[in-house]
Amino acid sequence: MLELTAYEGKKRGKGAAALAVLFAVLATMYTGTFPSVVEGMPPGTFDEMVSSYPAAMVEALNLQSLTTIEGYLASQLYTVGWILLAGLYFGYAGAGLIADDVDRGRMDILMFLPVSRARLVAEKFASLLVPLVAINVITPLVVYVSAEVVGYPVNALDVAMLHLLSVPYLLCCAAIGLVFSVLVDRASIAQRGALGVLFGLFLLESVVIGTDFEVVGNLAPMHYLDPTAILLNGEYDPVAAGILLAATIVLVVASQAWFTRKDIA
């Protein structure tokens, strides 16, 4: 059982390690620069800066408070680095799961294995747990330790909960990529499609907030993960996480159903 997942996961080991190091560096950089930012900011500067930004940018970057380390990390590290960049990474990775093997002519070999197509899709998708676990274990530890070192400690539970609740979000982004992976045989096209959709949803969710079309933003996975609410206010939303998990399951099952009936050229 899960031999394919183990094989694919092992192949992702180096990439997962590199990704974990990247986010560890980002976490250290943002945490380390916070003291100079907050100590060099005259009173009222933050409010003036935010008021000069377009409303869509304020919403997109969650610019509620740059004068606390929680608000700073929520807007700089987690909104940009985590919700956007990590989401795009997992969408890109998901888009290559099936399409890359089809594109390179390796899928015929996999078809000879005593594994159903549905199981093949599921096990390949499960291999993404390797980078997912790596970054969600390393990054919060680095954030917590770095914040202690610079003298601006953060709540360990809030940081841990943010990463726990981000797991369904990143899985949903990967599942969106998986849909493209089974729909398109060219890996590059599937990956560009997944990146375009996820980035478009990120912008859409930011633009429609506070408008008559705000309900449209519910289609974006980003709508269901709020780093600012978690880090600043200690507000956890397990219902939103459940919605993301349900969406992930639906997308994976739909991908399995499509791939099972698909003709492989």
Image: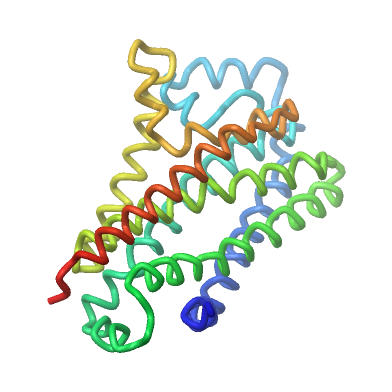
Q: Foreground: 265 or 86?
A: 265
Image position of 44 (left or right of 168): right
Q: Foreground: 88 or 37?
A: 88
Residue at point 73%, 26% (across, down): 233
Residue at point 54%, 20% (across, down): 50
Q: Using the image, determine if residue 232 lies above or below residue 214.
A: below
Q: Foreground: 214 or 119?
A: 119
Q: Which residue occupies the extreme top position in the image? A: 212
Q: Using the image, determine if residue 154 lies above or below residue 123.
A: above
Image position of 194 (left or right of 2): left
Which image quarter is the C terminus in?
Answer: bottom left
Q: Position of residue 117 (x, y in %)?
A: 32, 72
Image position of 69 (left or right of 237): right
Q: Position of residue 144 (x, y in %)?
A: 79, 50
Image position of 39 (left or right of 173): right
Q: Using the image, determine if residue 47 lies above or below residue 103.
A: above
Residue at point 29%, 60% (across, down): 191
Q: Position of residue 162 (x, y in %)?
A: 67, 42
Residue at point 37%, 85% (across, down): 114
